[in-house]
Structure formats: structure tokens, C-alpha cells
Amino acid sequence: MLAAAATSISRDDPLSGLAVGERPDPDPREGWTVVTVRAASLNHHDLWTLRGVGIDKERLPIVLGCDAAGIDEDGNEVIVHSVVTTDGWTGDDTLDPRRSLLSEVYDGTLAELVAVPRRNLVPKPRALSFEEAACLPTAWLTAYRMLFTNGAVKPGDTVLVQGAGGGVASAVVMLAASTGYRVWVTSRSEDKRARALEFGADQAFEPGARLPERVDCVFETVGESTWSHSLKSLRPGGTLVVSGATSGSEPSAELNRVFFLQLRIIGSTMGTRSELAALTRLCEMSGVRPPIDRVLPLSDAREGFQAMLDGDLFGKIVFKTS
Ligand SMILES: NC(=O)c1ccc[n+]([C@@H]2O[C@H](COP(=O)([O-])OP(=O)(O)OC[C@H]3O[C@@H](n4cnc5c(N)ncnc54)[C@H](OP(=O)(O)O)[C@@H]3O)[C@@H](O)[C@H]2O)c1
């Protein structure tokens, strides 16, 4: 089968370890099934793997990719949930201490075929194209859990989304705006602030700006450079949900502010299979769709990786297999 794989690791030149070519077809384990991939999307996670983050060298070569939509062995249209839990785990998928994402331990989705645990398949609504469905399982699922599981906010509340141009952040903006939240955003870029307003944000600010009033909840993926502003923007008793730290992960904790104002800080990672199913229904019913920067044949995967490396994109990069 055709696949995009990591064959070696380089911190400074990640694309030197990317191999787009023939790989053996998957040989599914007990309880697993093989999905014929119709579309798969790219994540920063794939570049991190090529840089050696979150992967053991002994696992190489490994097929990259966390996100896919395709056809299962019974002919059903499906979306692949990327969180692989240990055999026998019955709790929240994201809380299994030995969970992995596809492409960390087992071959990933940037291929014509991918083997996954049977329980990881979610029905694909007809209303979503394969390309749209393939964008949901990582960034959009992370946004869904941040907002609806860990956010502890109600429709009508005011939320602040930091770094609104980011993949996870823009998904939070679109989901929050479509479900009745008042959404305020920050972004360093005027273009991205304008785009966030198009996606349904109510007001857009420069990073660090004084807001018209304090907010009920802040959604953080930027980290160090926006952390202090996030804490200062919360009302007493407000909630900060954090799922990433692009600009650095060691901000000043500002503990006096945290305890005196009784702020809640909640970490959030990926989402469960049932949250992915709920996200697909929400997209189907609300009409919200992930923005797609470009669709490329899988054979041109290198072009998509280069665009992500250069930051030359707005929305998801999707690979088609046929
Ligand atoms: N926990 C999880 O399950 C999970 C899942 C997916 C991603 N993540 C993590 O979440 C983070 C964001 O991922 P993503 O895919 O959304 O990344 P992304 O598309 O690259 O977005 C990151 C955003 O952060 C802002 N930013 C970056 N550097 C900054 C700086 N120095 N100062 C201020 N703002 C800065 C930018 O916003 P503006 O340009 O708009 O200012 C940028 O668009 C990453 O750390 C990723 O590893 C975690």
C-alpha cells in the first residue's frame, strides 16, 4: 500500500525522515479491523514525530497520521478514533495511563489502509464529506472536550480563546459560536482576528488587551506568552482550560491570583470515542465544518508537510488516497 512513514528522526530537518512510498499492508491484531482510508488529515503531531517527540526510535519505520475517514470491512462509512487504549480498559479513553495515539505505537492513518481496534470506529454521517470527517479526530475532538466536557460553561456565558488562528483554537471558536456562547478571541495577526470574526467570534483583540469585562472561561493552547493575560481575564471562580503550550510551558503560576479568586485550572487532552461521535452529530446538525486549506493526493504528502512546516496554511491539510 502507499503510505507516508517516518523512517528516521531529525530535530532540525524533520522532512529528511519522511518517506512516501510502498509499505506492507496491515496485519490486524485480535479485535482489530482494517479500514480503507478515503481521506486522512495532517497534524502538528506528525511533524513532532519526525522530530523525535513522543516516539521511541525502535518503533521506526512507522506510518504517520492520527486522523482518517474511510470504509470499514463491512462497507460502512466510518471515522477513526485515534486514541488506542490498553486491552480491557473500560474507563474514559483519555485517562488510560498507557494509551497511545495512532502513529505512536501502531501504524497511523496516512496510508491506503489502516488497522485499528474495532471499538475505535465511529459512523460517518452522510452530510460530512470524507475530507471534512477526516479533520475531526484530533484538533476538533480536543476542542470539543475542552469546551463541552472540561469547560464547565453554559450557553450565554462569555469565553476567551487565546491564539485564535491556531488549529485547536479556531475549532473552539467555531464550536462555541455555533452553540450559543459569547466568544472573544485574541490573535497576533490582524488577518486571523478578522477570520475569527467570520467564524462567529463576537469581538477580537490584540494579545494582552484589556477586555470589556472579565470572562467565565478561557481556552488556552498558546501557553507562556498568554498565560498571565488568561488568569487576569477570568472572573472570580472562573475556569481556565489548557490543552497546549505552543509558546512555552513554564509560565509564572501566579498562585496568589489562583487561590484568592478561586480560579479553576483544568488540563484537557484529546477526547473519547463517544465525544467524537457527539462531535460528528454536532457538525451534522449545526452545519459547522472544519476549514480545509487544501486537498492533495497522498503521493504528494511531502508538499503538505512542507506547507505545515512553513506555516503556510489556514485550516487542515487533507490527503486523498483515491
Ligand atoms: N492536548 C491535546 O490533546 C492536543 C491536541 C492538539 C494539539 N495540542 C497542542 O495544542 C497546541 C496548539 O496546537 P494547534 O494545532 O492548534 O497549533 P497551531 O495551529 O500552530 O496554533 C498555535 C497558535 O498559538 C499562537 N501562538 C503560537 N506561538 C505564539 C507565541 N509565541 N506567542 C503568542 N501566540 C502564539 C498562534 O496564534 P495567533 O497566530 O492567532 O496569535 C498560533 O496560531 C500545541 O502545543 C499542540 O501540541 C494538544
Image (cartoon, rainbow, N blue to C red):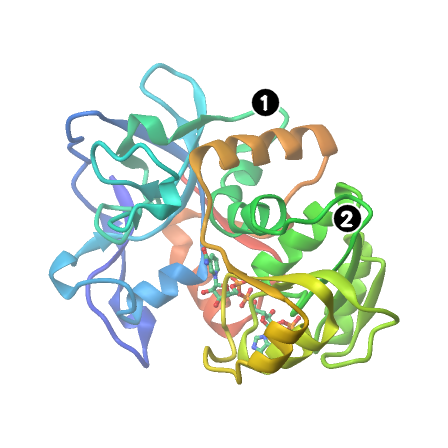
Which label was assigned to residue 282? none
Q: Residue furthest bottom?
A: 252
Q: Tell me which corner region of the image, top left, top right, bottom left or bottom right, holds residue 84.
A: top left
Q: Under 8 Å from ligand 1: the CB of mark 1?
A: no
Residue at the spot 15% in from the left edge and 32% down from the top edge:
27
Is residue 186 toward the left or the right of residue 11 in the image? right
2 or 1: tag closer to the N-terminus: 1
Q: Dot 1: what SS?
A: loop
Q: Position of residue 104 (x, y in %)?
A: 26, 54
Q: How many C-alpha atoms fall within 10 Å of the one at disc 2: few (<14), some, or many (≥20)?
A: many
Q: Is residue 106 above or below residue 7?
A: above
Q: Position of residue 179 (x, y in %)?
A: 75, 41
- Residue 222 seen anywhere in this rendered image of the structure: yes
Is residue 90 toward the left or the right of residue 277 in the image? left
Q: Which residue is mark 2?
A: 177
Q: Residue furthest left?
A: 58
| Residue type marked 2 | Ala
Q: Is residue 181 above or below residue 39?
A: below
Q: Under 8 Å from ligand 1: the CB of mark 2?
A: no
Residue at the spot 28% in from the left edge and 40% down from the top edge:
85
Q: Which residue is mark 1?
A: 126
Residue at the spot 70% in from the left edge and 40% down from the top edge:
288
| Residue type marked 1 | Arg
